[in-house]
Every structure is written in structure tokens, then in C-alpha cells.
Image (cartoon, helix red, strand yellow):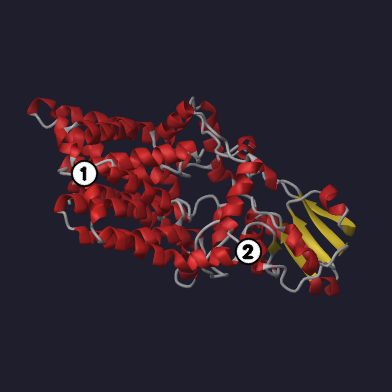
């Protein structure tokens, strides 16, 4: 592989390490750190890998923003390298590899997932690792390589269940191409068995807990929480989240795979992408759900552009996609990475003709995009809760529980609380419900994230200890800190009723 792509990967790594400590912890990051303190074979809303990674990071690098986000930064750099490798396998030379690396580096969604510590950072590596193996199978005919595909797919399932969508799309693509011959061999079936064995402990965990993930998905669908886009708007959002500058490249990639003689051998990649796209469109998936599938199409598009511009008189055209990509990246960079102060960003956002689209209805009221807004106010919230906790009598503090209405609030207490002398939090949201009420019975409960009206029928006395407000934070986090004295029912007995899987 050419060194250009390696330099681009190194540049992306440095960019992410520079921006990692800016702003604050994202709400999901707080939850994933808490998952790392409750290692298990599964969680309500995801498989176990993020919890294990969180545990490893906590016990090696620590829990600072730079520590946890350095993992995602490394994943972003690896994705750049892997995309360039795929371009090389598809027959791309220096320009194709560099362009593919640039697209993977500056795809808008890749900048976001490379910035935040979430399982989304790992997802495209597993998908594209499988794609790379698939390309090698096509080129060499070595069916034994399916075992590597099965290993990566199994690990990918332990990271996110969406790996199953990609795996299913590959099967559909095989049926639609001459590569269906693999289905007559034993190796692809052994690969499927290997992936199943890897994910089996999580399947057993789900069975033992009555399939919480399926219940969560049903609740989300029934609540209407997510924004559902019509097909044309969904396509427009794909162009936006991937960076409009990459659109000509991935469009060229699809054309090359489906309509050219050179791309015909790798058409299985095109059908895989189309199937993934159709699946998430039909399932009303969020706009970023398809993003792990794009690198292989971007690599194909880079090869197509390189070959189209190979004649000497056309070489100058190669500057066009690069300039377009870098121009859109410069324009959108403050939207996807905290390269400027919040105040500067808000002023910049006001002047942007292309505004970010919220993927959940509740996000629309926030001044900042969700991946920024949910980073503010956490330690201030914990300090406010600590003030209410310290004002309790010594006897009350012995029995006082701190209840977070969502996993981010509870996770913030768990991360920052020791600094303020607070006990670990409890909650009913997602896996916090499974972790239970500890030994608390409900004599005194400090509650974050609910209203007096919701609480006054459940307690003998409700006191407003403070009101939370952060001008940049998520709007639903602006509310009172309440002290409930004399919960009317024993917390241990009513715990099943506090479950909030949404």
C-alpha cells in the first residue's frame, strides 16, 4: 500500500486526539463506562464488547476524555488504512488509495464516530474487515478464507447486532452473483457456525433475560421516538451525513461495480451495499446506520475515478474530487468535530444554509447537535446533587439513594460522584434496571430527571433541592433535583415498575 494513505491515517489520528479533550463526556460514554463496571455477556441495548473495552481502558489508560476517546481515534485511523487497502485490492494504485483514504478520513459520520467512545467506532472495521476477506475470496478462489469472515462477523455481532444485517446482505449478494458457488462449499457454512458460536453466550444471556433488546426495539418503535424519513429525504440525508464531497465518489463506485467490465468481478460488493441500504430504508433506520458499508463503495469509486482519468490528457481532473471533498470538509468540520468554541460554533451554525437534521424528535429543541449538546452540564449536575446530599442529616445519608431517570444521569453520578463523596447511582433506564436497587428501600431518594408532579404521589414529601439548567446542554436535562422522603412503597418490591427501556 502507498504511503500517502498512511500519512492520511496518521493525520486523522492526530486530529481526533487533539479534539478529544474538548467539550465534555457524551451521555452514552458515561453509560458505557458504567457498563464496564458491570461486565456481563450482554446489556439491554447492546452486546457485551463495549463493556469489556470500557473495562480494559479504565484499567490501563484511565477514564479521562483523552483516554477513552483515543480508542475511537485509533479506530478512525484504522478505517482510513483499511479503506485504502480495499482500494488496492480492487486494483487501485496511488491516487485511488489516497482518494479512498481521504473519503474515509473526512466522511462526516466517520469524523463523529471517531470522536466519541462508542461501539459505532468499531462497527465499520468489522464490516469492512469482512468485505476485505470477501474480496480476497473473489480474487483467489480460496474458500477457506470464509473462516476469517466468520470470525470477524462473530466479533462484529458481539459489538453491534447490526452486523447481522451486513452478513445477511452478503448472502443476498452471493445469490445474485456467480459467487453463489461458495454456498456449495462447506467453508461458508463453517464460517456461519463459527460466528454463531462466538455470539452464543450473548444469545444465552438474552434468553435468560427474556430478550430485552427485542423489547427495547419494540418500545422505541411504538413510542415514535425516532424521526422517520421518506425515501428521497433519506437519500438526501445519506449525502449529508457522509459529506456531500464523497457523493460523486460513492456514486462512481456503484456505477463501476454494476456497469463496467472491470468492476463486474466484485459486483457482490455492490449488491451487498444495495441490500444494506434497502434494509435500513425499509426498517426506518437512522441515517447513520448504513455508514459502515460505505468504505468499500468509496474504495470502488476511487478506483473508477483513477481509471477514468488515467489518460495523460485527463490527469488534471483528479484534482476535482479532492478539492470538492476538502472544501466540503472545511465547511462541515465545526459541525462534526469541536474544532472551535461553543460560542463560535453557534454563530457559525446560524449562518449555515445546510442545517444538521435531528435523528430523534426530542433532539430538535436543542441549540446544538445532539452529539455536542449531550456533553454539557454533567459535572455541574453531580455537584448540585452532592450539595443536596450533603444537606441531608447523617442518618438520612446512610439510606439515601440517588436515582437517575436516564442512563447518562446515573452514569454521570457513577463517574464524577466519588469526587464529591456520593454513592453509586441506581436507575430504571436500560441496563441500570438490571443492575437493581442495591440495598436501598426508599427512605430517602434523590431523583434527577423527573418532575414534582410525577414524584409527589409516590412520596410522603417532595422537596425541590435545586433546578438544573445549562444553556448548551440537552433540553431534557434542564429540570429539578428532587429529594423524596418516605417512598410509599418499598423500592425492592416496586423495582419491576421502574423499568424504562426506551
Quadrant assignment, res 44: bottom right
Callout 1: few (<14), some (14-19), or many (20+) C-alpha neighbours within 10 Å? few
Determine the residue located farthest toward the right in the rendered image: 460
**Mark 1 and mark 2: Cα distance apart in space:** 56 Å
Tell me where residue 421 appears, x and y as whole percent.
70, 70
Residue at the image position 51 percent from the left and 62 percent from the top: 64
- Along the line of sight, the residue nearer the viewer: 273 or 337: 273
Residue 218 x %, y %? 61, 48
Q: Is residue 102 left or right of residue 89?
A: right
Q: Residue at x 48, y 44 (%)?
A: 338
The nearer-to-camera label among 1 and 2 is 1
Q: Pinpoint residue 142: horizontal percent, then vertical percent.
A: 17, 58
Residue 302: x and y in percent read 23, 38
Q: Secondary structure at mark 1?
A: helix
Q: Residue furthest front?
A: 184
Number of marks in picture:
2
Going by the image, does 254 lie left or right of 202?
left
Mark earlier in primary sequence (1, 2):
1
In this view, the residue in front, 24 or 216, is 216
Q: In the visual, does 292 lie left or right of 482? A: left
Residue holding disc 2: 416
- Tell me: residue 56, above or below residue 335: below
Q: What residue does disc 1 label?
A: 178
Asked which secondary structure carries label 2, the reply is helix
Question: Horizontally, is 343 left or right of 66 in the view?
Answer: right
The residue at 88%/59% (across/down) is: 459
Image point (41%, 60%), residue name: 71
Note whether 355 is above or below 83 in the view shown. above
- Tell me whether the residue at label 1 lies in contact with that at label 2, contact meaning CB atoms closer than 8 angstroms: no
Dividing the picture into quadrants, the one containing residue 239 is top left
Please determine whether, in this image, residue 131 is positioned above or below residue 310: below
Amino acid at each position: 500500500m502507498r504511503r500517502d494513505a498512511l500519512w492520511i491515517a496518521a493525520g486523522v489520528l492526530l486530529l481526533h486526539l487533539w479534539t478529544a479533550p474538548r467539550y465534555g463526556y457524551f451521555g452514552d460514554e458515561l453509560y458505557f463506562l458504567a457498563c464496564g463496571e458491570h461486565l456481563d455477556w450482554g446489556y439491554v441495548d447492546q452486546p457485551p464488547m463495549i463493556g469489556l473495552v470500557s473495562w480494559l481502558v479504565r484499567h490501563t489508560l484511565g477514564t479521562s476524555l483523552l483516554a477513552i476517546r483515543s480508542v475511537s481515534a485509533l479506530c478512525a485511523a484504522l478505517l482510513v488504512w483499511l479503506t485504502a487497502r480495499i482500494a488496492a485490492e480492487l486494483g487501485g494504485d496511488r491516487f485511488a488509495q489516497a482518494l479512498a483514504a481521504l473519503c474515509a478520513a473526512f466522511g462526516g459520520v466517520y469524523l463523529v464516530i471517531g470522536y466519541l467512545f462508542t461501539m459505532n467506532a468499531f462497527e465499520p472495521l468489522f464490516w469492512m474487515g469482512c468485505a476485505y476477506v470477501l474480496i480476497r475470496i473473489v480474487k483467489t478462489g480460496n474458500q477457506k478464507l470464509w473462516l476469517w469472515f466468520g470470525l470477524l462477523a462473530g466479533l462484529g455481532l458481539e459489538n453491534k447486532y447490526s452486523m447481522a444485517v451486513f452478513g445477511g446482505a452478503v448472502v443476498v449478494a452471493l445469490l445474485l452473483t456467480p459467487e453463489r458457488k461458495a454456498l456449495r462449499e462447506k467453508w461458508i457454512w463453517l464460517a456461519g457456525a463459527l460466528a454463531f458460536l462466538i455470539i452464543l453466550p450473548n444469545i444465552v444471556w438474552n434468553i435468560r433475560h427474556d430478550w430485552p433488546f427485542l423489547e427495547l426495539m419494540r418500545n422505541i418503535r411504538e413510542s415514535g421516538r425516532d424521526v422517520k424519513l421518506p425515501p428521497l429525504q433519506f437519500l438526501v440525508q445519506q449525502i449529508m451525513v457522509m459529506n456531500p464531497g464523497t457523493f460523486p465518489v460513492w456514486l462512481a463506485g456503484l456505477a463501476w461495480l454494476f456497469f463496467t467490465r472491470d468492476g463486474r468481478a466484485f459486483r457482490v460488493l455492490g449488491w451487498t451495499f444495495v441490500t444494506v441500504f434497502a434494509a435500513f430504508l425499509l426498517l426506518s433506520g437512522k441515517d447513520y446506520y448504513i455508514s459502515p458499508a460505505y468504505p468499500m463503495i468509496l474504495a470502488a469509486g476511487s478506483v473508477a475515478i483513477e481509471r477514468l482519468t488515467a489518460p495523460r490528457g485527463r490527469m488534471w481532473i483528479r484534482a476535482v474530487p479532492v478539492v470538492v471533498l476538502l472544501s466540503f470538509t472545511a465547511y462541515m468540520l465545526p459541525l462534526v468535530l469541536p474544532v472551535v468554541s461553543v460560542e463560535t460554533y453557534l454563530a457559525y451554525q446560524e449562518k449555515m444554509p445546510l442545517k444538521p437534521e435531528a435523528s430523534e424528535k426530542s433532539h430538535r429543541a436543542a441549540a446544538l447537535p445532539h452529539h455536542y449538546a449531550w456533553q454539557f452540564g454533567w459535572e455541574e449536575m453531580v455537584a448540585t446533587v452532592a450539595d443536596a446530599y450533603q444537606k441531608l442529616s447523617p442518618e438520612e445519608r446512610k439510606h439515601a439513594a440517588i436515582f437517575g431517570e436516564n442512563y447518562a444521569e446515573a452514569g454521570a453520578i457513577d463517574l464524577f460522584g466519588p469526587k464529591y463523596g456520593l454513592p453509586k447511582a441506581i436507575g430504571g433506564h436500560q441496563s441500570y434496571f438490571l443492575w437493581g436497587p442495591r440495598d436501598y428501600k426508599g427512605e430517602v431518594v434523590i431523583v434527577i430527571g423527573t418532575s414534582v408532579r410525577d414524584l409527589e404521589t409516590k412520596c410522603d414529601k417532595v422537596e425541590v433541592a435545586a433546578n438544573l439548567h445549562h444553556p448548551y446542554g440537552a433540553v431534557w436535562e434542564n429540570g429539578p433535583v428532587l429529594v423524596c422522603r418516605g417512598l410509599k412503597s418499598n423500592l425492592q418490591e416496586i423495582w419491576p415498575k421502574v423499568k424504562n427501556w426506551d
